[in-house]
Amino acid sequence: MSEDERSKMAAVQCCRFCGGALTRFVDLGMSPLCESFLGAEQLDSVERFYPLVAYVCGHCFLVQLHDYVSPKEIFTEYAYFSAFSETWLAHAQSYVGQMTQRLSLSASSRVIELGSNDGYLLQYFVAEGIPVLGIEPAANVAAAAEKRGVPTRVEFFGAPVARGLVGEGIMADLVAGNNVMAQVSDLNSFVAGIKIILKPKGVCTIEFPHLLKTMVGNQFDQIYHEHFSYFSALTVERVFAAHGLMLFDVEELPTHGGSLRVYAAHAERPTYPRQPAVDSLIAREREAGLDRLTTYARFVEQVQATKRKLLRFLIDAKERNKTVAGYGAPGKGNTLLNYCGVRADFLDYTVDRNPYKHGKYLPGTHIPIYPPEHIARTRPDYVLILPWNLKDEIAMQLQYAREWGAQFVVPIPELTIF
Ligand SMILES: [Zn+2]
């Protein structure tokens, strides 16, 4: 597709929230779905690649991908089980304690979680005797939640599902949505549904990776097909306001390289006073230029510089006959490796703690995945840490590799060897 044809296509498709015109934010080339790991028998087959191009709306500044792949195709059978991650469980448990206290939740309340996965979060409310309902589109993951004692509906949440639940007399004192709003293709229906399902004094909390952190921290590998939208607080405020919801508080969290948790309630009934944190965060975003297209246009330069630095390091290491292994097989790693064109010719292999990935290959780049012990067996000169947000934890686990002089490398925010 030529540059002209592509920009024509961008002009045809418009913002999924406000219908405004879209401008190119960053083009990360062609990329397969980042969770579609391949078995050895699939390596000779055709693999589907989609353009990984992010756009920004010139009106509301929502950063977004076209949904080339429908949510049904991605999320109906999903391989990601939240309860496998201990850090994430601890995060969920502390959220439950905090919210139970702040909203005085009890046996007469109800908590609804959107994208409730395997019940990893709602199980802690159940333990407190607080009634819950999970909404989760992936049937296999929802089944795991039911086993945990978390009642779960297999649905894509939106206004029609919300109306159905209200018809059954089900409404929420608390609606929770953690890392789910990015995966919604009909954003307006999703937020309209929250408005419908919230009791008059109900509160909704939504967590998502913070676009400001993504841009300042050069975290372009957070962009992948499974995430249709990328949010700043100023855009989320607009989206919620359009559906009669008002942000009244926000917290900055360290998860996923820097996330936001926003609190919203019905706008027409100001039950909760607006905390100064909301306006001060939005002011910081404006200072950083998130309300100007020129800021977004500059992002591509740092992305391209990162690619050159990573390739320069790999070429140099290979010319010195050094071996380079990867650590981890996260979605973000697949964006990085596909965009940079790094295959097994640069990265001999990668390792991962998840046994489901062993013996499989990374989508697109076909780099083999081994258990972590493979590093001790092969003694590589460098280990490229793909989940760079966990670099301290991983470097600690790999301390033994210092014995043979191995060095660790992170590609983001800037290529660093340590
Ligand atoms: Zn827009």
Image (cartoon, rainbow, N blue to C red):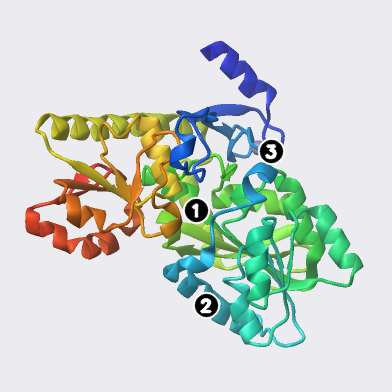
Circle number at residue 16: 3
**Callouts 2 and 3 close, C-beta under 8 Å:** no
Mark 3 or mark 1, which is nearer the start of the sequence?
3
Secondary-structure class at tag 2: helix
Identify residue type, mark 3: Arg
Q: Residue at x 57, y 68 (%)?
A: 275
Q: Residue at x 67, y 78 (%)?
A: 149
Q: Quadrant of residue 175?
A: bottom right
Residue 132's x, y, as percent? 71, 76
Residue 11's x, y, as percent? 65, 22
Q: Residue at x 37, y 42 (%)?
A: 218
The residue at the far right in this view is 167
Secondary-structure class at tag 3: loop
Quadrant field for ligand 1: top right
> On screen, 141 above or below 301?
below
Q: Residue at x 46, y 74 (%)?
A: 90
Please name the residue that numbered disc 2 is placed on.
Answer: 93
Q: Rounded to the nearest whole Å, what is the CA distance between mark 2 and mark 3?
A: 33 Å
